Image (cartoon, grey):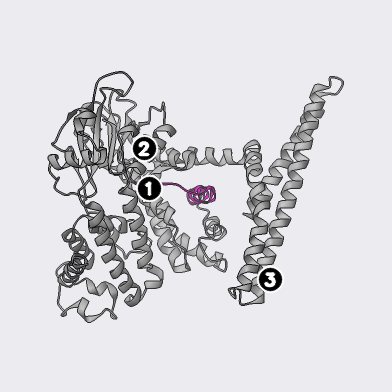
Amino acid sequence: MFERSRRLLEITRTIRRYGLGELLGDNAPRWLVGAPRDFDEPVAVRLRLALESLGPVFIKFGQTLSTRRDLLPEGMAEELAKLQDEVPPFEGAEARSLIEAAYGHELERFFAEFDEQPMAAASIAQVHAARLHPGEGEQRGAAVVIKVLRPDVHERVARDIAVLYRFAKLAARFHPEAERLRPVEIVSEYDRIIHDELNLMREGANASQLGRNWAGSDLIVHPTIYFDYSTETVLVMERMEGVPIDDTATLEAAGVDFKVLAERGVEIFFKQVFRDNFFHADMHPGNILVQTTHADRPRYVGLDFGIVGSLTTQDQRYLAENFLAFFNQDYRRIAELHVESGWMPADTSIEDFESAIRTVSEPIMNKPLAEISFGLFLVRLFRIARRYRYTVQPQLVLLQKTVLNVEGLGRDLYPQLDLWATAKPILEDWMRRRADPKIAAQRLQKQMPQIIDGLPDLVATVFRRAEAGEAPGAHQLEGALSQITRELRTARRAMRWTMVGTGLVVVSAAELAYPALPVWMAVITGLAGTASWVKAWRVTATAA
């Protein structure tokens, strides 16, 4: 408790020293603002300097905050993005002790070599080179890296997170736009992210999933995770070789085609999002190497898998349609998609929102294709949407951050990068696959039991809430019952079309097996069955 109070006092002094009380507006408590004074730097620069002075947990919080461009004032996100997660390493002998404590045995029992000089150090963990003992098995004698959590990192994170919550509650009380900014939710999101990073087994599982998704690919490779040697505080993985992607001089000397390298990065990202629905959400240059064995087909090496993202199928569809509508300059469809998805209130004026989207999009679209920025489009779209009571989607914020990273990296490598030329075929292929009748029928078959089985629970929930006094108006009950009726009607219609389609396909197969009947008759029957399946899928998709 004493340590937490001391830290709270230290942070309060830092806020006063950098004049950050003004971020809370005119209602900020006097003890936090301090005496009025003039500053040479703008508040965004002072915030960055203050976070740097408060140490690693606050630096990472600032980095996370920099992804919330939908909430931050103009220019602040760019300033916070300059924060660097660089801390001095701790002693190699201490790293050895931490690993041995995790294993319950001396390090030499598991490793033939261990380099006490760290390869890299960050706020959460640091990395050491090592080698497994020789012997039988594919992993024996392998060159590995050991990632080990910093000493006392759990205690320091818990202390600083508790202080962040205190100040978030102050912001929620005094900031004039607290309802929109939701500071406590921002800290809660960061709390989840940083605690996920504190479990190295989770990072290992992320790396393993990405490796499985891209097995055999010449686009990207991921290190093998040695789970037998890993714990929540120690992660052992294959040591990967490659050139850091921002070492352009070495890449150029190796004859790497930078256009191909940039396009491959875009392809990897969009396939992770739409093909795999599992994307690396921390794609900055420090986490990427390049293998140059084939300079005309350079291969990416992914590292550091603490932060990953995924989307619901519905979010994937809305996002893909948003991108396609943007490049087709169909601003009305973008507005409709935001309301259909539930990201915007149902009473949003489509016409007004369409006009606002056109206002921010046209300046971007009037540039050559190679200069059009996906990331800038998303930033401006989220910024304009918040004026229409846009509900922030955390998974899309993570995606927006990754788009900005990938796009910025690609343009650094090859300034003429046409992101759309690479992304459009992937999006269109994904949309075609979703419309494939066979895939649609399979998806409908999986969803139908959930639709039907979920209805009794919905009815029970409505009446339970009514009995508890949580449904004060009859109109709310009427609305809920109307929803039930609609879902029942949808389920019945979809089931009817599915049964008709299945029956027609079975008849078509029987007609093909009967030689006396002409083939065209079986084809027509089969097409009719397929059309019925598509109709069933459209019924459920429209309802969703």
CB atoms at circles 1 and 3 under 8 Å apart?
Answer: no
Crowding near the residue tagged with mark 1, few <14, some 14–19, many ≥20 C-alpha atoms within 10 Å: many
**Residue 66 locus on image (x, y percent):** 30, 57
The answer to whether residue 167 of the structure is visible from this angle is yes
Q: Amino acid at mark 3?
A: Glu
Region rendered in magenta: 307-327
In the image: residue 306, left or right of residue 6: right
Regarding residue 242, the answer to whether it shows in the image is no
Q: Amino acid at mark 2?
A: Ala
Q: Which mark is residue 403?
A: 1
- In the displayed structure, would residue 285 be above or below residue 365? above
Quadrant containing the C terminus in the rendered view: bottom right
Q: Is residue 319 magenta?
A: yes
- Reading the chain from its start, which is encountered first: label 1 or label 3? 1
User: Please, is residue 137 above or below residue 418 in the view?
Assistant: above
Q: Which residue is mark 2?
A: 207
Label 3 sits on a secondary structure element that is: helix
Q: Quick one: 327 or 275, which is closer to the camera?
A: 275
Label 2 CA crowd tier, 10 Å (few <14, some 14–19, many 20+) = many
Q: Which mark is residue 478?
A: 3
- Does 499 appear in magenta? no
